[in-house]
Amino acid sequence: MTIARSFPALSVLLAASAALSDTVVVTTGFDDIDIDWQTATIADLPGPDGKVSFSEAMIATNNTPGHDRIEFAIPQREWQLQFLFPGRAVVKAINTFFWRANDSVTIDGTSQTAFTGDTNPDGWEVAFYGGGVYVNGDDSEVTGIDSLPLDVTGDNALIHGMSGTTNITLYDSHGSVVRDNIGGTIKVDRSNNVTVIGNTVRRVRVQGFVSEFGTGPVLNTRVGGPTLAERNYITGYGTHNGEGYPGGTTVELFDTTGTIVENNWIGTTPDGMSSGSNASTQGIGFSGENHDVLIQNNRIAGILGIGMGPHAAGLLFGYGILVGGTGSGVVITGNTIGLNASGEPVLGSVTGIEVSDYFAGPMQDVTIGGTNAGDGNEIAGHLFNGVTIEPSVSGVRIAGNSIHANGALGIELLNTGFNYGVTPNDPLDGDTGGNELQNYPMLTGAAAEGASVHITGSLDSAPNRAFTIEFFASSECDPTGFGEAERFLGRVDVMTDSSGIADIDATIMSPVSGSEWITATTTDKTTNNTSEFSACLGVTGSGACLGDASGNAVVDVDDLNMILGAWGTEVGAGSPLDLAGPDGWVDVDDLNMVLAHWGTTCP
């Protein structure tokens, strides 16, 4: 098993566990039983045939008090089903009734590798055929098995280092950890405080049961984490029905509370450069009732279901994130949606993010982006809209994002007739629809002034109300004349008067070039409704030399060295080193500004 080398701490953990446990060694892949299933303990092994089957190992460890171990040393002369499982010792049974661990146990398939060597270059050296294994005892561990259907109901389980087509289901298994596995599906079903990290699988499902007959939401699931070792590669799940329509959710959230989905790559091959499934139609899908969910710093791309014959050939379907169902408190922040690992917007869906009123909705208190450095999402490369808010949905705050290179609008607020396209402003903003069809600003001037830009305009909206106006720069204007928003510049607050009018006169400490276009959004500070993008307005004046930290009018190695030399320091908004602005820190945004304009010579 070549991937064993990916887990350097595995041998240490298993050795420590072995020192504290009684050990049974399975010596045959045939599942014969010649011991008393009601009374036999480890001391009674082997039976009269001189061999130990997996069922006998499970019987004996269940009947022996305390935590025990099951290892494997099946001679190659006994290996069966090699046409299905080449290079693996296969445990085969017709009746798998005894494949149930009712007491605490470690099942260690890596021991077979130690016994016979690395005979399966694609995974571990022991596999199971005929049924799945059930781990019902608390504090159990399973590792080193290839292509195993595994069901876990014991608490505080550790499932790690599996391979092949392994599917793992946790049911009523609290406090368990699923890490460093390769397989198909990981399902967290009514299991609280579960951690899912470091896996490469097709999909992850997190499911509670909120009803008068149910157990309530599943609590505090963590899928991924801030470090590279905790990242899951969830490559995409979907199937085509008999009509040829694709469908499938790669990360499914149903009836959850306190879920964190962080730093995963969702929908792509593990290298982040291609779609992982041609049938997945939702990257992250919300249904049922979800509360207090954080979707943070993930790469979501390649979610594009491709229709097939007989009736869907050539049709395309897909949402990077689809927020449906009911609940509250969804925060979507710091993600890239539609971009490959090189940052190119070539793996988009049909829609980047859609907030829907489907299935008893809508969701309340949804935030896309945020007001702090790093909160913004990059949403790009989608065939249709970057963000769509359906008619009965309101209170979706869309802040600080980079939304660009989408086929239709960057932000689409649908009216009650589901009419797509730019929604005209109306006096006093009394119309209804997605985000209550919040009016966007009307910009009249955008003058570059060195490291800043002076923007003027007005807002016509609800009277005597406070609003936040966000400004963005783009290298080109959208074909509609409205949006999009490649680069966030900054924000100001305004207050409308009794006539619903507020003047906009803001100096934003972010550099812009004379060839860029400025757009803006409005967010009602009372309701959190964010508007579509305003009409774009060309910058006047020569503007800044973007990426030129040194001031020598060319973007070159001097600028790169200045950024790297000040990396991670706070320099203040308006500093020549705060190239991307306006957070006042030297960070990856400023580095990307240098790289994006490398070799540019300014007038």
Image: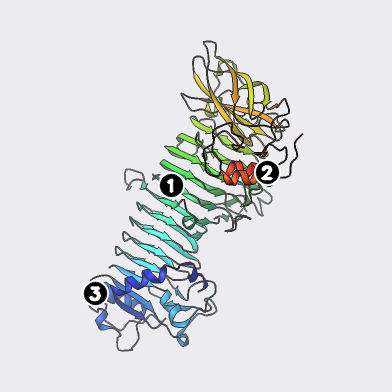
What residue do we see at 63% from left, 19% from top? 457
Secondary structure of residue under mark 2: helix
Q: Pointer 3 and pointer 2: residues touching (CB < 8 Å)?
A: no
Q: Does residue 440 appear anywhere in the picture?
A: no
What label does residue 260 carry, if any?
Answer: 1
Q: Does residue 429 appear anywhere in the picture?
A: yes
Residue 254 position, x and y percent, is: 43, 47
Residue 127 position, x and y percent, is: 46, 74
Quadrant of the frame with the C terminus: top right
Q: Nearer the viewer, residue 227 or 173?
A: 227
What residue do we see at 48% from left, 28% from top? 528
Reply above or below: 346 against 33.
Answer: above
Q: Nearer the viewer, residue 364 or 459?
A: 459
Marks 3/2: CA distance?
A: 65 Å
User: Which residue position holds label 2?
Assistant: 596
Residue 87 position, x and y percent, is: 52, 79
User: Which residue position holds label 3?
Assistant: 64
Quadrant in which residue 541 is drawn: top right
Marks 2/1: CA distance?
A: 32 Å
